[in-house]
């Protein structure tokens, strides 16, 4: 299969379907009350719990308003995400109110994978989640973590809605699965469980929310990890087991918060050349931006994520010892890709989890069904598409190369 080359990132050639979706996007008002009113109307509920989230929601919305290149579809999408999280918050509070026994659910020794975006964290967590003894967050459940009154039955309608929504999204952006598949049953990031508390770096993937980024980086994330743990308790109460396997890149920049909330957590940390990570991540974002933004500024997009990855990695290097060595392992991407089962075996040993015949059979089946580049391989051009001085970026990340012996991956036009 030939490499996939996306040659219209700067000046997208929109399809008729993409144009129709943009034209059909409804106008939205980025106010807290508009979001909360829509959530109340969707659920018939009104108790959002502790009110401190309103300030964070207001910053999200102000950041979206200040992102002048967001188009109508981008704004409508982000407003819809806020409503989705507010709906989830209402249902979480309602479930806890009706079932206070959820507080007794123990989240013990969760396996919490950290690592840069595009460094194999999604693949690793899906391998581990093949073991039925572990609880995970499939995409359909992160989209709607608590069932509504019409979702109870033999066939959960939440999964059907997620399949329909993401199926339509991938039809509109058909190259997206080659960069990041969004199958309903694949495990998704657990920072989605912080979404109803309106925290994490989630807004940065769909916009350039400078006001929110600055607030997030200046704030202790421990309360939001505690909120996500509360959601995990509810999900385990609804359907066990209670030992979890999750993943999210921001765990790398929040290791003290993670360790404070989950003192028994097992934390595998994947490490990959940040230049390779950068070219993959921003190409994926730029491809999606064709339907979200009215103007593509690829150098600005690159600059944003160079800065963000640097902050994330500096915090990881600073705080790496926040998780004791007895409960953590560093996984180098090139070693992981060379022998995935050996990597999984190391995680199992660290987690004191027996590799049963059933678990191994399920893991083998997942690996066989999901080879690398299953949907094709995208050809990237960091310098040509984004105007990035690769040598200068490598110098900025020298502190990370010095701390972790990741293998540098050559990018177009570079000789290593």
Image (spheres, rainbow, N blue to C red):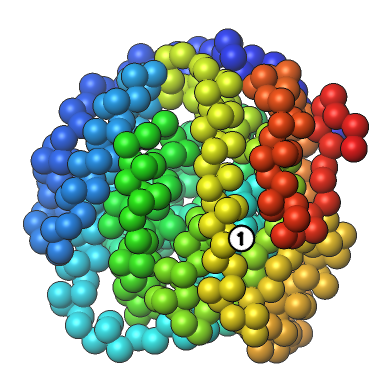
Check the image and report above or below for 73 versus 48. above
- Which x, y percent locates residue 5? 75, 23
Left or right side of 240 for 115: right
- Which x, y percent locates residue 156? 39, 61
Question: Which quarter of the image is occupied by the N terminus?
Answer: top right
Left or right side of 316 for 100: left
- Which x, y percent locates residue 273? 74, 47
Check the image and report above or below for 220 versus 198. below
Residue at (34, 25) in percent of width and height: 67
Check the image and report above or below for 388 versus 122. above
Residue at (62, 43) in percent of width and height: 180
Q: Secondary structure at mark 1?
A: helix
97 or 386: which is nearer to us? 386
64 or 122: which is nearer to us? 64
Residue at (90, 37) in percent of width and height: 416
Q: Which residue, given by chain and number where applicable, does mark 1 sit on?
A: 317
Left or right side of 33 for 310: right
Residue at (51, 32) in percent of width and height: 304
Q: Residues within 10 Å of mark 1 (few under 14, many from 20)?
A: some
Total numbered circles: 1
Left or right side of 60 for 285: right
């Amino acid at each position: 299969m030939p490499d996939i080359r996306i040659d219209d990132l700067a000046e997208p050639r929109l399809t008729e379907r993409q144009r129709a979706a943009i034209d059909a996007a409804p106008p939205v008002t980025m106010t807290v009350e508009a979001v909360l009113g829509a959530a109340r109307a969707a659920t018939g509920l009104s108790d959002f719990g502790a009110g401190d989230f309103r300030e964070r929601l207001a910053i999200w919305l102000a950041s979206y308003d200040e992102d002048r290149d967001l188009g109508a579809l981008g704004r409508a999408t982000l407003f819809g995400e806020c409503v989705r999280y507010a709906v989830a918050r209402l249902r979480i509070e309602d479930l806890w109110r009706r079932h206070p026994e959820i507080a007794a659910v123990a989240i013990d020794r969760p396996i919490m994978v950290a690592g840069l975006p595009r460094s194999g964290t999604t693949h690793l967590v899906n391998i581990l989640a093949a073991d039925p003894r572990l609880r995970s967050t499939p995409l359909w459940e992160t989209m709607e973590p608590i069932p509504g009154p019409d979702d109870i039955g033999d066939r959960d309608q939440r999964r059907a809605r997620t399949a329909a929504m993401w199926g339509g999204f991938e039809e509109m952006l058909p190259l997206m699965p080659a960069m990041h598949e969004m199958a309903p049953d694949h495990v998704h990031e657990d920072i989605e469980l912080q979404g109803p508390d309106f925290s994490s770096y989630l807004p940065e993937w769909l916009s350039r929310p400078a006001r929110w980024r600055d607030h997030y980086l200046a704030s202790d994330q421990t309360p939001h990890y505690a909120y996500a743990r509360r959601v995990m308790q509810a999900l385990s109460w609804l359907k066990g087991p209670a030992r979890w396997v999750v993943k999210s890149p921001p765990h790398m920049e929040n290791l003290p918060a993670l360790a404070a909330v989950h003192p028994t957590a097992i934390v595998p940390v994947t490490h990959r050349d940040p230049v390779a990570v950068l070219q993959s991540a921003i190409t994926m974002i730029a491809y999606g931006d064709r339907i979200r933004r009215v103007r593509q500024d690829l150098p600005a997009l690159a600059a944003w994520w160079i800065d963000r990855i640097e902050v994330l990695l500096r915090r990881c290097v600073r705080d790496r010892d926040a998780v004791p060595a007895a409960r953590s392992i560093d996984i180098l991407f090139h070693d992981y890709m060379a022998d995935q089962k050996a990597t999984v075996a190391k995680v199992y040993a660290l987690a004191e989890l027996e590799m049963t015949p059933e678990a191994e059979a399920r893991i083998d089946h997942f690996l066989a069904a999901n080879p690398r580049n299953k949907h094709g391989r995208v050809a990237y051009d960091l310098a040509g598409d984004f105007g990035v001085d690769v040598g200068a970026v490598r110098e900025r990340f020298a502190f990370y190369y010095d701390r972790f012996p990741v293998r540098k991956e050559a990018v177009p036009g570079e000789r290593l």
